[in-house]
Image (cartoon, grey):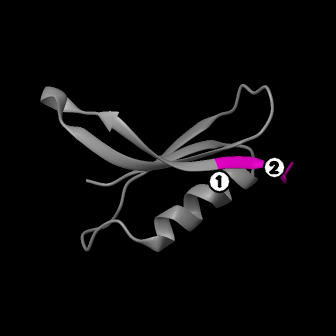
Amino acid sequence: MSYQGMIAENVSIQGDKGDWISAYAARPLGPGPFPGVVLVHHAPGWDEWYHEATRKFAHHGYAAISHNL
């Protein structure tokens, strides 16, 4: 099942020792609950592909987040 509506946004989450980490989160619109997935970027770093992949998971019914390490 694919969801046409979703919410996708930049968020900040508090990490270890109070450090703030930027992340990109997306989820389908609707009441949920939704299964979740965390995307971890490769060595060169966080880039546009991770935003796209996060939205793609939401399109397929997942709550997804990609954090910028």
Q: Which residues are magenta?
A: 1-7
- Residues at marks 1 and 2, CA–CA distance in whole angstroms: 12 Å
Q: Secondary structure at mark 1?
A: helix
Residue 18 is left or right of residue 44, and the answer is left
- Main secondary structure found in the magenta portion: loop
Residue 5 is left or right of residue 38, and the answer is right
Relative vertical location of residue 53 with respect to residue 61 in this rendering, above or below: below
What's the residue type where badge 2 is placed?
A: Gly
Counting from the top left corner in percent of width and height, residue 4 is at: 84, 54
Residue holding disc 1: 57
Residue at x 32% of width, y 55% of height: 68
Relative vertical location of residue 34 with respect to residue 58 in this rendering, above or below: above
The stretch drawn in magenta includes residue 46:
no
Residue holding disc 2: 5
Q: Residue furthest left?
A: 17
Counting from the top left corner in percent of width and height, residue 48 is at: 47, 72
Marker count (numbered): 2
Q: Which mark is residue 48?
A: none
Residue at x 58% of width, y 67% of height: 52
Counting from the top left corner in percent of width and height, residue 53 is at: 57, 63
Counting from the top left corner in percent of width and height, residue 55 is at: 63, 58
Residue at x 28% of width, y 44% of height: 21
What's the residue type where badge 1 is placed?
A: Phe
Q: Secondary structure at mark 2?
A: loop
Pick whichever of labels 1 and 2 is earlier in the sequence: 2
Residue 32 is left or right of residue 69, and the answer is right
